[in-house]
Image (cartoon, rainbow, N blue to C red):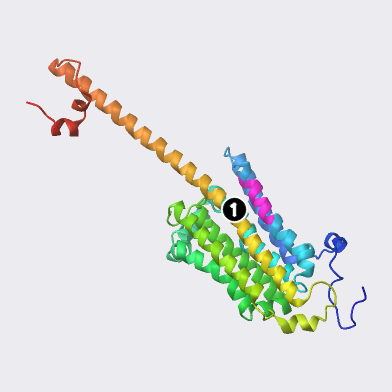
Amino acid sequence: MLLQAGYHGPPPFTVVTAITQWTPDVPAILFAAIVGTGYFLAVRRLTAAGGTWARGRKVAFATGLGLVLFFSVSFFGVYADTLFWARAGQVITLLMLAPLCLAMGSPVALALATLPRKRTDRLRGVLASRAMRVISFPASGSVLLIATPWLFYFTNWYPTVLSNAVVDELSRLALLTIGFVYFYARLQLDPVPHKYPHLISVVITFVEVIFDAALGLVLWLNPHIIAQHYYQALDRNWGPSLRNDQIIGAGVLWIAGDAAGLPFLGALMRRMSVDDDKEAAEIDRQLDEQDAALGSEATETEDDTAAPASRLWWENDPVLAQRFHRP
């Protein structure tokens, strides 16, 4: 296919170019290298000191960094400024998929377990601050996560990202940060300022699914082309039309957003199950201690008063014994 003289973007998107087209996104590469090195050095330090770190956490964190890297240097990064759907895949990954995996790696708990005392005290102070309490409040994080893609696509934010490389990099970092803070507060795998019932997060997830669908539908049915002047100036004469490109991108946002909710719900259900098991074990322990204490008191009473050994079960309970005391 011959390209128009005014077009200066990447070659037409095909299966071959999806495999061969890569871009050296230096900020993304440095981010993945620095964060990944710090995380796994901390794991090594913890294990060297005799501690343990679950393999699932390491895999989840590595997957999150891998997603950040892949969607920055692969064909998604190459075509992000040319095809609406490529940028949409990048946005939803950095806002939901990658942060979920990073939060499942429990980096805050790892930092608290391995950093020097002064730094851990400082980190605990940040976690206990009023700002963190506001950010980790269920409504705050949910509104921020839901509002971000709407602001991204329906303000000048999106056209600016397409035309300004610095804003592009900072925006991707902002998306990743917003998503991480949300999942950090919702999963509660790391220490949080205040713990909320996981059922609240389950309800919030279903609300988010509705807003994801609404965003996809609005972009799908909206006759207005987002960043139309920018895309028209590209003079792209291959691939889908501007309208169809936006429709494909709307589907990517919708489907990928809902798909991200599935592993999140799975993680929440697992957390609820683990917490229920811990609560049941604690109740059993308390009941065992009460039974042991009551048995000891009953034995002492029998030894002191030479009372008959056969007594009704409720007579050994101090509360019920007073309520049903018989002279």
Could you classify mark 1 by the number of other residues whose Cα lies within 10 Å: few (under 14), some (14-19), or many (20 or more)? Answer: few
Position of residue 267 relative to residue 232, above or below, is above
Q: Amino acid at mark 1?
A: Leu
Position of residue 176 relative to residue 117, above or below, is below
Q: Main secondary structure of the magenta part?
A: helix
| Image quarter of residue 152 | bottom right
Residue 196 shown left or right of residue 299 in the figure = right
Q: Quadrant of the N terminus?
A: bottom right
- Toward the viewer: 116 or 101? 101
Counting from the top left corner in percent of width and height, residue 88 is at 69, 68
Q: Quadrant of the C terminus?
A: top left
Q: Is residue 227 visible?
A: yes
Residue at 73% x, 84% y: name it: 229
Counting from the top left corner in percent of width and height, residue 285 is at 37, 33
- Toward the viewer: 181 or 320? 320
Q: Which residue extends farthest left?
A: 327
Residue at 65% x, 53% y: name it: 38
| Image quarter of residue 216 | bottom right
Counting from the top left corner in percent of width and height, residue 189 is at 52, 50
Residue range (magenta): 57-65
